[in-house]
Amino acid sequence: MLEMSREEFEELVAEALDRIPPELTALMDNVAIFVEDDPDPAGPELLGLYEGIPLTERGDWYAGVLPDRITIYRNPTLRICETYEHVVEEVEITVVHEVAHHFGIDDERLHELGYG
């Protein structure tokens, strides 16, 4: 497995978020981004996870709720990557994928766009 500190990985996630166009990040609402080492061991080996209510499903009733949560997982990403450059690429794909879920874009469409 490729070695990378938590801090270095978090910086890659921050850089990937910075590359999202400002017009889109301005529309992100009530969402928090986290980095964790591993997903729930009882579940699948995920690189990232979006938990929340997509913007497209929020209505007048949406108020007083906890923020949506996007989690990017360090160890699964490092396990599938062989080089630093591959980690950078995979983190960017994963960040965009999970942010897209916040905007209501489903997995099928993300695969079509190359963010699967």
Image (tube, rainbow, N blue to C red):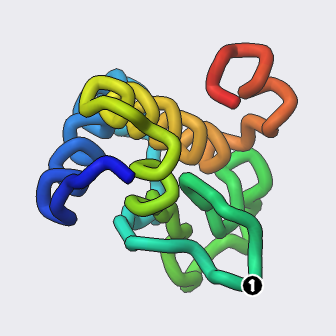
Relative to 8, say whether 43 is above or below. below
Residue at 42 percent across and 62 percent down: it is: 75
Instruction: Identify the residue shown where x is 75% and y is 76%.
Output: 43
Quarter of the picture containing the C terminus is top right
Q: Is residue 53 above or below residue 101?
A: below
Residue 3 in the image: x percent, y percent?
A: 24, 54
Which SS class for mark 1? loop
Where's residue 90, x and y in %? 45, 33
- Comparing 64 with 38, the one in front is 38
Residue at the top extreme?
113
Residue appearing at x 74%, y 36% in the figure = 105
Q: Pick the residue in front: 16 or 47.
A: 47
Query: Crowdedness of circle 1 by 10 Å Cα count: few (<14), some, many (20+)?
Result: few
Residue farthest along the front direction in this orientation: 1
Q: Is residue 47 left or right of residue 12?
A: right
Could you say where residue 40 lies in the image, as x and y percent from the top left? Answer: 63, 81
Report the residue that reaches farthest toward the right: 108
Left or right: 14 as drawn, with respect to 97: left
- Splitting the image into 4 quarters, where does residue 104 fall? top right
The quarter of the picture where residue 35 lies is bottom left
Q: In the visual, does 105 lie left or right of 100?
A: right
Task: Report the residue marked by disc 1.
Answer: 42
Residue 68 point in image, percent of width and height = 55, 68
Q: How many marks?
A: 1
Q: Would you identify the image quadrant in which residue 23 lies?
A: top left
Check the image and report above or below for 15 versus 36: above
Residue type highlighted by circle 1: Ala
